Amino acid sequence: MNCCKILGTIDDLKKVINEYKIEEVVQTQYNLGDKEAPEILEFCRSRQIQYHFIPDLVQIHQKNIDVATIAGVPLITLKPTPLEGWGKVWKRIFDIIGSGTGLIVTSPLMLIISILIKLDDPKSTIIFKYLDDGSRVKRVGKYGNLFNFYKFRTMKPGTHNLRYTDLAGKNTRDGPLVKIENDPRITRIGNFIRRTDIDELPQLWNVLKGEMSLVGPRPHLPEEVAKYEDHNRFVFTIKPGITGLAQISGRSDLSFKEEISLDSYYIENWSLILDVKIILRTFWAIIKERKAS
């Protein structure tokens, strides 16, 4: 190490990278703690910094990597995801065409749903725009940026925060996510809208505006994301989606770890063909749900 200038410790890494405009990181210590190693990896991923590491033998089987040997030492390089570069452009074109077409085709259905929501509760708003405290409904998007989120109202007004208080004992999800079993806040028309996923249709506007994608990780609430560990934040390197690999692979039955794993797989293995397959599987799942009901 006499030939190398020491710029700091592992705790100084983020500061050093920002100060010296580092473009590549080589991690030579493979026995870092369970917290430190994922933090370094996700920090590099989120800033498109080339990341290499010298592994122990168990790590060599991992996917999405290139392996080289330097002076007899195996050096692993994390490959860019398909959504870096032109992949991002093609996905955006696909989103614009898909969301624009979807808005035109589903506009009569959305008008009917809007009327039904008003008939069910004339005092409620059609689109779920505001929380109990009057603030706008937000979701966490790409790179952790917040955006205004559109969704048909399916719950009674003024009941959003009950998920963290009176109804917390009915939460069926693990980790930071919340899913209330037999949710009493849902309106009569809301039950039907949710079963058929029609409540998601206004999100086509989010897609057209560039805040969401047709396919991607599930858009989560800021208070849920605040509880994420750093190594879970890889999913925020792309836009959230109306549907996604995790959404069609078990809906709310997945554990938080399984959902993150599926979202990470999607990011690392993205293709337009995969997006089309996920959308088709989404339609099929909706059809099966309608037949079952």
Image (spheres, rainbow, N blue to C red):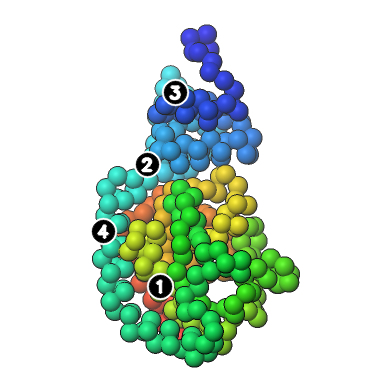
The residue at 44%/23% (across/down) is: 20
| Residue holding disc 4 | 93
Q: Mark 2: which secondary structure? A: loop
Q: Residues within 10 Å of mark 1 (few under 14, many from 20)?
A: many
| Residue holding disc 1 | 202
Q: Residues within 10 Å of mark 2 (few under 14, many from 20)?
A: some
Q: Residues within 10 Å of mark 4 (few under 14, many from 20)?
A: few
Viewer-side residue, 290 vs 56: 290
Name which residue type carries label 4. Ile
Point out which mark residue 80 bears.
2
Q: Is residue 86 above or below residue 24?
A: below
The residue at 42%/22% (across/down) is: 70
Mark 3 and mark 4: Cα distance apart in space: 36 Å
Name which residue type carries label 2. Pro
Q: Mark 3: which secondary structure? A: helix
Name which residue type carries label 3. Tyr
| Residue holding disc 3 | 20
Quadrant of res 58: top right
